[in-house]
Image: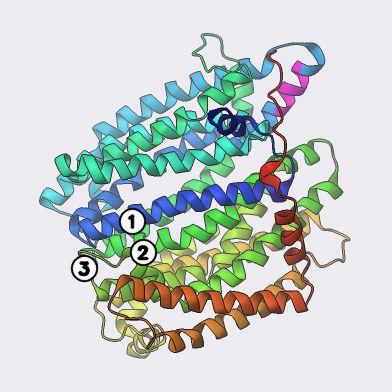
Amino acid sequence: MVKKILSYFHKEIPNINQAALLLGLFAFCSQILALVRDRLLAHMFGPSPSLDVYYAAFRIPDFLYISIASLASITVLVPFFIKHHDHDEQHGTHESKRFLNEVFTAFLLVMIGISVVVCIFMPWFAKLLAPGFSGDQLHTLVQVSRIMLISPILFGVSNLVATVTQFHKKFFVYALGPVFYNIGILIGILLFSKYFGVVGLALGVILGALLQLIIQIPVIARHGYILRVTRKIDWNELRDVVKLSLPRTLGLAMNSIAIMGIVSLASLFTPGSISIFTFSYNLQSVPVNIFGVSYAVAAFPILAKFYSKEDKEGFLNHIKVAGRQIIFWSLPVMCLFIVLRAQIVRVILGSGRFSWADTRLTAAALALFVISLVAQNLIALLVRGYYASGNTKRPLIVNIISSVLIVFGSFGLVSAYDHTPVMRYFIESLLRVDDVANTKLLMLPLAYSIGSIINFFILWIYFQKDFLKGRTESFFGKTFIQSFSAACFMGFTSYHALGVFAPVFNQETFFGIFLQGFFAGIVGIIFGIFILGLMKNEQFLELKSTLHSKFWKSKSIPPATEL
C-alpha cells in the first residue's frame, strides 16, 4: 500500500487535461485546508486588530518574494532548463545540474542579504504599510513581519526545485506542496498560537513553507538533482535569466504593490477591515487556484516546448484548449458564488467571533471579487503563453496599467462612495448590506475586479496582435456563449431553489445553512449540465471522456536514469 502511494510521486502525466485535473484536485484539497484555516482564524480571532496585523504582516515578505525570488521562478527557468537538459541528452554532460546549482547559490546570496537589510528597516516599512496602526499593533506588525521574512527564502528554493518536478511532469508531488503549506499553517493556528499568539501564526507559516520544500526533495533526488552551493557561477547566463524575468518580476511586483495599497487604505478604516478584505479575497482565490492556475500551470511546460520547436500551431492549440476549459469552469462557478455567497461565507467562516454582520459584509465583498473570475483565470493562461514565448515585456506593461488602476481606483471609489449618497444606496441595496456598517470597504474588491477585467481585455488585444494575425477562427466565443448560457440557468435555478429549501432547513444552524446552499447548488448544477448537454458543449463532452478514462489509474512512468 505504501509502495503504491509512493509510486504516485514519480508518476509522469503528459496529457494537459489529466494534468490540469490532477492539479485542480490537489488545489481543491489545498483550498479546503485553506478554508479550514480561515474558519479557525475567523472563529478564534474574528475580524479584529490582531488578525489585521497577521494579514498585513504577509505583505512585505510577499513583496520581497515576488520582487526578488521570482527572478528565478519556474516560468522563467523552465525554458533555460529545457535547453540544458537537451544538451545533456545529446552530449552526455551535466549542464542542467550546473545551471540549477548556480541559480541556487546566487539566489541565496541575494535573498539573504536583502532580507537582513529589510529586517533592520522593518519599523519604517511597517509604518508605511499600515498608517492606521499604532502602539502595540504596530510593534507586533514589525515583529511578525520579521519572522515571516524567512518564508521568501524557503519559497524561492521550493520554486527552484519545482522547476525539475514540472519539467519531468511530476505534477503529483508539485501539487502536494500547497497542501503541506496549509498543514503547517494549521499547526501554527491550533498549537503555536496558544502559546505565542499572532507570533505563533507566523511560525506556522514558516513551518508550512518548509514542508512545501521538503516534500519535493526526494523526487528530484531520484532524478539526480541535489542543490549545492557552488563557487563558480556563470554570471553571464544568470544575467540572461534576470534580463528575461525582470519584466515579469516587475509586473508581479506591481500587483503586489496594488494589494499593499489596498491594505494600507483598509488600515485607515474600522478595525477588522483588513481581515474582511483578506477573507473575501481568499475565498475568491479558491476557484482562481483550482481552475485558472491549474490549467495555466499544466499548459506552461508544453507551451514552452512547442514555442522552442517553433510549432506555432501546437502552441496556439494548447492556448485555445486550456482557455476554453477555463471559461467552461469559471462562468458557472462565478454565478454560483454570487447566488450562494451568504451560504458560502456563513458555512466557511461563520462561527465564534465572526458575526452575522461580518458574514454579510464578507459575502458582498466576495460577490464583487468573483465578477472578475473569468478575467483573472484567463490572465494566468495568457501571461504564461507570453512567458513561454520569451516575451515578458508585454504582460509587464499591461500589469502596470491595471495595478495603477486598482490603486487609484480604490482611493477614487472610496472617495466617491463617501460623497455620493446615490452610489452608496445603490451598492448597499444591490448587495443587501444597507444596515451593515463599514460598507465603503466594498469599494476595494470592486476596484480590484475592475482593474482585473481591464487587464484581461488589454492583454487579449495584444495577444491577438502578437500571435493571431491572419487567423479568423473564434478562440473562445462559442465556449463563452454556451458556458454563459448554462451559468445563467444555473444561477437562476439556484437562486429560486434557495427560497424553496429555506423553510425546509433550520437557518439558525450550521447544517441548516449548509444543506440549503448545498441542495440549491446541486439543483443549479443539474440544470446547467442539462443545458450543456443540449448544446453538445465540447468541453463538457471532453470532461466526460477524461473522467471515463480513469486517468488516476494510468501506469506510472519511472524516473529517467541519472546522468
Name the residue beneath numbered marker 2. Answer: 348
CA–CA distance in space, label 1 to label 3: 20 Å
Query: Which is the main secondary structure of the residues drawn in magenta?
Result: helix
Amino acid tagged 2: Ile
CA–CA distance in space, label 3 to label 2: 23 Å
Q: Magenta residues?
A: 82-88
Lower sequence index among marks 3 and 2: 3
What percent of the width, then of the height, locates residue 349? 32, 64
Return the mark for residue 270: 3
What percent of the width, then of the height, locates residue 75? 62, 39
Query: Which quadrant of the view contains residue 168?
Result: top right
Amino acid tagged 3: Thr
Binning the other alpha carbons within 10 Å of mark 3 as few (below 14), some (14 to 19) or many (20 upward) gives some
Q: Give the answer, above or below, for where 117 lies relative to 97.
A: below
Spot the residue most to the front.
1
Left or right: 263 in relation to 391: left
The residue tagged with tag 2: helix, strand or loop?
A: helix
Amino acid tagged 1: Asp
Left or right: 243 in relation to 359: right
The residue tagged with tag 1: helix, strand or loop?
A: helix
In this view, the residue in front, 541 or 177, is 541
Name the residue beneath numbered marker 1. Answer: 38
